[in-house]
Structures are given as structure tokens and as C-alpha cells.
Image: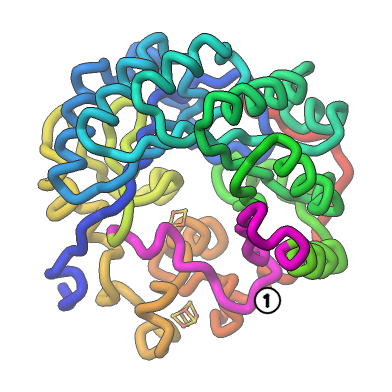
């Protein structure tokens, strides 16, 4: 084990996947192919224990996510437990299946921040992408309620070929809804999204236009709204430091209590995950095989092993490396130094106008 791994850093963020149940059918869903069932979900008391252990481990904020977290009847109690543990609480919601009254109770329970995903600025296309009629209308109404309650709002805009030319309109919509931040997040192609890669993949020209549009929007709206955006993977020269580096900054707890280094980690078959029902979170962070597998740099192959960027991007995304090469230790093929980089360019050229395969 290398020096980085021995001095395991403390995590800052906990993604609490409260449930995999969700009313939407987004074709780019990032949840695993095999969803966990309601009967396997952790109860309120176990989540309370997880939040306390996370805070003791150094975690500062938790993202209450899903699926749709509002599918849980105890969402208010869970939010209060996270707040009482001293964590900054961010609710990541589709805003479908959640009422104004619930938001008021969540606010009273100490909810600090809300992130609502919006599929497009046009209601018709937005509902088509979400696979749910009427979703846009509900999202816009609930977003207005969040800002009325004084809870900071982030709009999450997942971009792909059908909506990437609407970046400006999405930022305008986020501003109109009172958001303080908008995330221009490009589809990540693993899990369910792999089934729709050809339907979702933007063209190089679209990506270039969107990058220029974001630069102009940042200048125009400086001081009004923060615009987070990165170049989509398949068109980048270097990969992102996925999850801030494996086992360095964050952890994920699945609905049934498995603890993962990233939300897609179960797509790597060789990994074994420990569960909060059997192990304390600190033990899992420090000693579980899945966290040790790619923490630090010892596991790397060339060209990462001798690359000066090895401790900046940590070799990119392990899940993407596995999805594209079958080897989770390979350099992320998004990197132009990867021997598999040409594959990324070839895949980006494969586009089809077939119907989406919705997540059901
Ligand atoms: Fe990052 Fe590896 Fe590419 Fe170097 S070779 S830039 S460490 S992915
Ligand atoms: Fe798993 Fe990037 S999504 S490491």
C-alpha cells in the first residue's frame, strides 16, 4: 500500500441513497442495473446511526438522494436525524411525488439545500426525456416553493444531444426559478445510460457551442448565479478526478446499507462491499476491500503510474475504465495518453435517433 493509502484522508461528503424507487424513467439514470427493493431498505434508526458515524468520521455534508427520496414516508425524520448529527443536508429530488407541505416540514426539520433536476426548458421535451407527463410543471412549481421558503436551490440540468443546445435557456430558467446555482452536468455513460449512449451522445459541434455558451453566460450572470460545467467526458483530453479520487473525499450508502466509493462502483464485478448493518462506517472507510482497491496510486498501470497528473486526476474514472476496457485498473480511456483513447472517439461518432430505453 502506498503512503497516500496508509494515511486515508477523511471523507467530506456522504451520498445517502435512501431508496431506488423513482417515478421518473430517465434514460441516463445513474442507479445500478439491479435496483434494491423497498423491503431491503435501511430503517430510520439505522440511517440515524449512519449520519452520527459519518459526522464522527469527519463528513460535513450529506446528499439525501435516490431514486426519489420523497418515496420514503420517513424523509422528514431522516432529514432531522442528519441535521441533528451536525451535517449540512442537501435534498436531491425530482420534485415529483413531493408536496409543498412536505417541503415546509423538511424546512422545519433543518433542511439546508435543495437540488432539483430539470430535463429541459421546454415542458414537452422535458416530460419526454423524463418519461413522465406533467413532470416539468410540478418541478417548476416545487422549485418556486423552495425559494419561497428561503431554502437555497440548485437546478441540475443533465445535458445530452436533445437539450445541449438549450444551455442558455436552462440558465435563464434556473434564474427565473430563483436558483443560486445551476449544474450543467453531461450524461455519464455507465449503468443504465450505456443502453442509450447512441441516443444521447451530442456531436462535437454541439459540445463546442455549449462550452462557448457557458463562458458567455458566466460573464453575463456573474454575481447572480453560479454555473458549474465541465467538458463532457468523451470530448475531453484529460479525465476528471472522479469522486475527487477513489476513497478520498466521499462515500455512498445504498438503500440496503452497502457502502460504495462511488455510485457506480457495483458495475465493477471484482469489488466486495461492506454493509453498515455489519460494520461501523469508519471501519468500512479505512479497511473495506472496495475502498482499498483503488485508493492512492499503487494500483495504477502505465501511463498513469509515472504521470505527473497521477495525484490530480487519480487516473480518471474506474467505472468508466472498466466499462470501456474490461480492466478497472486501466487508465480512463478519456485520457488522450490512454492506449484505448481512440475507442472513445469512435464511440462518440455512434449516434442513433432510436427511441430512448426508459428506466423502469
Ligand atoms: Fe491522468 Fe493517467 Fe492520463 Fe496521467 S495518464 S493524465 S494520471 S489518466
Ligand atoms: Fe465510479 Fe467514476 S463513477 S469511479
Is residue 231 in the magenta section?
yes
**Horizontal and vertical percent position of residue 287:** 13, 53
Foreground of the two, 110 or 335: 110
Numbered disc 1: secondary structure: helix
Foreground of the two, 234 or 154: 154
Is residue 241 in the magenta section?
yes
Residue 45 visible at all: yes
Q: Is residue 102 above or below residue 59?
A: above
Q: Is residue 107 above or below residue 183?
A: above
Foreground of the two, 160 or 304: 160
Q: Number of labelled discs?
A: 1
Residue 348 visible at all: no
* Quadrant holding the C terminus: top right
Which residue occupies 26% across, 52% down?
290
Which residue occupies 17% across, 64% down?
8
* Quadrant holding the N terminus: bottom left
**Horizontal and vertical percent position of residue 155:** 63, 41
Residue at numbered disc 1: 342
Which residue occupies 43% across, 61% down?
318
**Horizontal and vertical percent position of residue 268:** 40, 51
Model colouring:
rainbow
Which residue occupies 39% across, 49% down?
262
Q: Answer with the quarter of the image where residue 279 lies.
A: top left
Extent of the magenta region: 218-247
**Horizontal and vertical percent position of residue 223:** 64, 59
Q: Is residue 297 above or below residue 199?
A: below
On screen, residue 345 versus residue 355, left or right, reads: left
On screen, residue 262 versus residue 128, left or right, reads: left
10 Å neighbourhood of mark 1: few (<14), some, or many (≥20)? few
Q: Answer with the quarter of the image where residue 312 lies.
A: bottom left
Q: Is mark 1 within 8 Å of ligand 1?
A: no
Amino acid at each position: 500500500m502506498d503512503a497516500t493509502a496508509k494515511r486515508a484522508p477523511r471523507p467530506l461528503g456522504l451520498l445517502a441513497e435512501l431508496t431506488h424507487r423513482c417515478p421518473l424513467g430517465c434514460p441516463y439514470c445513474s442507479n445500478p442495473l439491479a435496483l434494491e427493493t423497498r423491503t431491503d431498505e435501511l430503517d430510520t434508526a439505522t440511517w440515524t446511526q449512519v449520519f452520527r458515524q459519518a459526522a464522527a468520521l469527519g463528513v460535513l455534508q450529506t446528499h439525501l438522494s435516490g431514486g426519489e427520496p420523497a418515496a420514503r414516508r420517513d424523509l422528514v425524520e431522516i432529514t432531522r436525524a442528519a441535521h441533528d448529527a451536525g451535517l449540512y443536508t442537501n435534498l436531491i429530488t425530482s420534485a415529483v411525488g413531493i408536496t409543498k407541505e412536505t417541503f415546509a416540514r423538511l424546512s422545519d426539520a433543518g433542511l439546508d439545500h435543495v437540488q432539483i433536476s430539470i430535463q429541459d426548458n421546454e415542458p414537452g421535451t422535458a416530460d419526454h426525456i423524463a418519461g413522465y407527463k406533467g413532470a416539468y410543471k410540478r418541478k417548476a412549481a416545487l422549485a418556486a416553493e423552495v425559494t419561497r421558503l428561503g431554502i437555497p436551490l440548485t437546478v441540475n440540468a443533465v445535458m445530452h444531444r436533445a437539450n445541449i443546445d438549450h444551455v442558455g435557456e436552462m440558465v435563464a430558467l434556473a434564474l427565473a426559478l430563483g436558483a443560486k446555482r445551476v449544474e450543467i452536468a453531461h450524461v455519464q455513460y455507465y449503468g443504465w445510460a450505456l443502453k442509450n449512449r447512441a441516443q444521447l451522445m451530442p456531436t462535437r459541434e454541439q459540445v463546442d457551442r455549449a462550452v462557448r455558451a457557458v463562458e458567455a453566460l458566466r460573464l453575463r450572470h456573474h454575481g447572480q448565479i453560479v454555473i458549474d460545467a465541465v467538458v463532457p467526458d468523451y470530448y475531453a483530453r484529460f479525465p476528471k478526478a472522479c469522486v475527487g479520487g477513489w476513497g478520498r473525499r466521499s462515500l455512498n450508502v445504498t438503500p440496503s446499507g452497502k457502502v460504495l466509493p462511488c455510485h457506480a462502483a457495483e458495475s465493477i464485478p471484482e469489488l466486495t462491499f461492506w454493509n453498515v448493518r455489519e460494520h461501523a462506517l469508519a471501519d468500512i472507510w479505512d479497511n473495506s476491500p472496495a475502498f482499498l482497491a483503488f485508493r492512492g496510486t499503487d494500483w495504477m498501470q502505465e501511463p498513469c503510474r509515472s504521470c505527473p497528473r497521477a495525484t490530480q486526476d487519480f487516473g480518471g474514472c474506474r467505472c468508466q475504465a472498466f466499462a470501456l476496457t474490461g480492466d478497472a485498473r486501466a487508465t480512463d480511456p478519456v485520457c488522450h495518453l490512454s492506449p484505448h483513447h481512440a475507442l472513445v472517439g469512435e464511440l462518440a461518432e455512434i449516434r442513433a435517433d432510436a427511441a430512448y430505453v426508459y428506466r423502469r
